[in-house]
Image: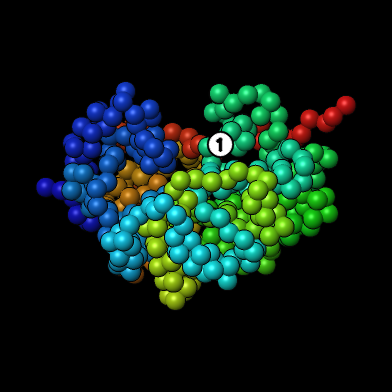
Amino acid sequence: MANKISLTNSFPSIEKSNELYNRALGLIPSVTQTLAKGPTQWINGVAPKYLVKGKGSHVWDVDGNEYIDYMMGVGPLSLGYAYPKVDEAIRKQLEDGITFSMMHPLEVEVAEMIRYIIPNAEAIRYSKTGADVTSAAVRLSRAYTGKNKILCCGYHGWHDWYIAVTARNLGIPEEVKSFSFTFNYNDIESVKSSIDDDVAAVILEPVVFQEPKDDFLHKLADLCKEKGIVLIFDEMWTGFRMAIGGAQEYFGITPDLATYSKAVANGMPISILTGKKEIMQLADEDIFFYTTFGGEALSLAAVKATIEELRDKNVPKFLNEQGAKLKNGFNSIAQKLGMDYTKAIGYNWRSMAAFDEKAGDPLLQKSLMQQEMIKRGVLWQGFHNMCFSHSDADVEYTLQALEESLNVLRQAVEKNKLKEMLHGEPVQPVFRKVDNFNMKPVKKI
């Protein structure tokens, strides 16, 4: 019988998941389309591999096991699975069509909504993935400044200009690699020391899990203005979650360009580029940024319905309040159990469990926690990505599951048996870690 949400579950049966996985091996490179969804980020042998249904904050795998989900599709489900108002908007648009031979009115209607929400949105363009719009922002920056180099901090997609700074940069010409560099978050001096007269743009995630310190973001904005460098906020995570207007609104900073996706359409594929008109107008004739599906109507209908719901229900406030219960609850439990080697960090709407190596390999600690949470019906990767459908009952149950799972971890650490207590293969290092961090531009001689 498939598992329900229960503290007394046995490990879930994942027979059908494994059957599909074996069929994918050798057919689909890495067997996944999204790294965070693939088997390297889940404990292989215990975690399900394929989900087939979602409703609210709950999902069901191909074997019928039910879980409370805290990944939320790796971010897009800001309201929850199968959210009635959004699905109704999609169904209504589906009756009239999906993609047309000319422009659709929703392109204008949604742009007008965004203009009043996002502080820098003097002009708006759409695409399909986050990488599309971050790359468009980089191209616009280069066109606007006449410069070439890009300084980045965070994760910005799979395109050449960014992946050049990571360990997985095979296939990228050396000439391309020579134009991309990184800097340290909360270290304005690392930015200053990386700037030369050929830097076109600074792009960063305004926050990931660290909070800005010593006015870092404001100093960065001032520095970019002083040096004539385009400032780009990559708001894939902060947009429409941190505040309706994203990090721009939250911190009171207006970047030159900003990029959005994930939360804005509750699961439908769309990305958005916003920016100051003097830069964005270069997309009229000077740069080429067009896609067949940029004006696809189902996603635009979902954006319109999602933004209305986020705004009318003040969803960011809810995410902050519900997320605080989990983040603070995790830390209270860890403190009560004397586990000073684990802590939930980040913002309330998206916190993460961090593990200190003094208690053993952090990935083994994370893997054991994930194993025990999945056993108890919680799909958990260490993140608490909150959505509007996470109920009080979900949170209360999750805290019970966390307490039991943390107790298992504590026992494993005390007995030095982290690896022995795993029933599957541990998770692998996440892709966000890059090589040669804080690289500096090569000075021209």
Amino acid type shown at disc 1? His
Instruction: Name the foreground residue: 54 vs 126.
Output: 126
- Which type of secondary structure does the marked residue at label 1 adopt? loop
In the rendering, at what x and y percent does residue 88 appear? Answer: 30, 66
Asked if 203 appears above or below 439 in the picture, the reply is: below
- Residue at the extreme right of the image, as rendered: 445
Q: Is residue 283 visible?
A: yes
Residue denoted by label 1 = 159
Q: Quadrant of the C terminus?
A: top right
Instruction: Name the foreground residue: 445 vs 2.
Output: 445
Left or right of 15, for residue 219 = right
In the rendering, at what x and y percent does residue 245 appear? Answer: 57, 66
- Residue at the extreme bottom of the image, as rendered: 312
In the rendering, at what x and y percent does residue 69 appear? Answer: 33, 54
In which quarter of the view is residue 432 placed? Answer: top right
Left or right of 83, for residue 237 = right
Which residue is painted at 66% across and 55% down in the image? 280
Which residue is painted at 20% across and 49% down in the image? 65
Crowd tier of the residue under label 1, counting other residues whose Cα lies within 10 Å: few below 14, some 14–19, many 20 or above: some
How many callouts does the rendering have? 1
Which residue is painted at 32% across and 34% down in the image? 44
Q: Is residue 348 visible?
A: no
